[in-house]
Image (tube, helix red, strand yellow):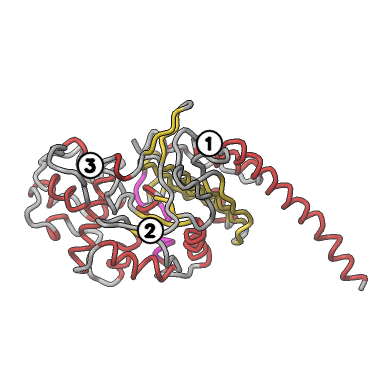
Amino acid sequence: MRSTILSLILLLPLTVLAEDLASRTDSLLASLYRPGLPGAVIGIVKNGSVVFTRGYGVADLVTKAPISATTNFNICSMTKQFTAHAILQLEGQGRLSLNDPLIRFFPDFTPRIGTSVTVRHLLTHASGIMEHYDHVDRNRYTEFWDRDVLTVLRNVDSLHFAPGTRYRYSNAAFCLLSQIIEKVTGEPFPDHLKSHVLEPAGMMRSRMIRPGFTVAERAYGYACGGDSITIADANESLFFSTMGDGGLYTSMEEYLQWIAAIDHDTGPEPTIFRTARSPQHTIDSSRSLSYGYGWFVGGTGAARVVYHTGSNGGFRTIVFTKPAERYAVVIFSNRTGIDLEDLVREINRIHGVDDGAYVKLDSLIS
């Protein structure tokens, strides 16, 4: 009896501390995301356990459906970690090599680029390949998909730099990776991702955008500036719907299962997580910043942080992890106008997490 009472007394300060941290986190989020307006959902993991999940605001200004942990958001460039995972699975199966040139998969690609740009270059933003946005006759398209990126770029005979020599963030590269997956597997990219990456990780309701796409509990994106709020979703942007670079819809509930798989080395091919989340191409050696495969990696040893952001239409997303502490913060938002990178720093301070190795990415992904 005495030992039980003593245990309860010792646990009480920890319970009070956890409640205080949750209250302070909630107050911060509630001050930014107002009821009845587009908002966000947040998830926090500490020591490998989910300690906080909460939604703020509405998913849709028409229906006023509240945002919750089961609301499905477009997670924008956080999609890249899933595309990369699928590529690394195929490498592990011997169905492709990261050293394979583009010409292996697309024989009609401009030879100078097709023979010099490899799968590894695409994965690490080291290809130097041009973005598709400036090479599109916008009068020809009402929707623009990954196959259209391939069509547009296969005849562009110029690079920003020699492949492998520099870093330049590239959405087009990940659209080409989705097409490589289709070439190798003979399956549509959304179907392959669903059966080989998402469902094995327990992400049963997550869906890749595609023609005729529908998803339950869907959030819509909004551009917010001053007193103005306008919808900024798939119908408002020609390039919103590309898949490999930013087309995945998922909920906080399901994405936290992905984080759990990373943390516990479970899910689809756990060694892939370790490879993808380790430095593969140096971005800035003075700041110990590198790109892995679908992830940014900062710092070394116990200070290492692994993270990514996303921006598409009215959606803004971020995942920040500190592997040594089994810590993660994830935010999905369906509105613009709030800097999620700064917000994560504030949350880290509340929870006493040293993020000195964390480098803001706004200048690295534009």
Q: Which residue is mark 1?
A: 342
Q: Within 10 angstroms of label 1, few (less than 14), some, or many (20 or more) residues?
A: few
Q: Give how far across and how far down residue 272 sits, in percent.
A: 39, 64
Q: Mark 2 or mark 3: which comes first in sequence?
A: 3
Looking at the image, is 32 positioned above or below residue 172?
Answer: above
Q: Within 10 angstroms of label 2, few (less than 14), some, or many (20 or more) residues?
A: some
Q: Could you say whether the residue bearing mark 3 is in a helix, strand or loop?
A: loop
Q: Could you say whether the residue bearing mark 2 is in a helix, strand or loop?
A: loop
Q: Could you say whether the residue bearing mark 1 is in a helix, strand or loop?
A: helix
Give the magenta range.
Answer: 272-282
Label 1 is placed on what type of residue? Asp
Q: Mark 2 or mark 1: which comes first in sequence?
A: 2
Q: Is residue 280 magenta?
A: yes
Kindly report which numbered mark, 1 or 3, lies closer to the viewer in this rendering. 1
- In the image, what residue occupies the spot 50% across and 60% down? 259
Q: Give how far across and how far down residue 46 sits, in percent.
A: 62, 56
- In the image, what residue occupies the spot 57% across and 56% down? 324
Query: Can residue 167 be seen here?
Result: no
Label 2 is placed on what type of residue? Val
Q: Judge left or right: residue 38 versus residue 215.
A: right
- In the image, what residue occupies the spot 59% across and 61% down? 48
Q: Which residue is mark 3?
A: 128
Q: Which residue is mark 2?
A: 215
Marks 1 and 3, Cα distance to the nearest angstrom?
29 Å
Q: Are marks 1 and 3 in contact (CB under 8 Å)?
A: no
Which numbered dot is residue 334? none
Query: Can residue 254 be seen here?
Result: yes
Q: Nearer the viewer, residue 259 or 212?
A: 212
Q: Judge left or right: residue 2 versus residue 58.
A: right
- In the image, what residue occupies the spot 84% across and 66% down? 7
Q: Nearer the viewer, residue 38 or 155?
A: 38
Label 3 is placed on what type of residue? Gly
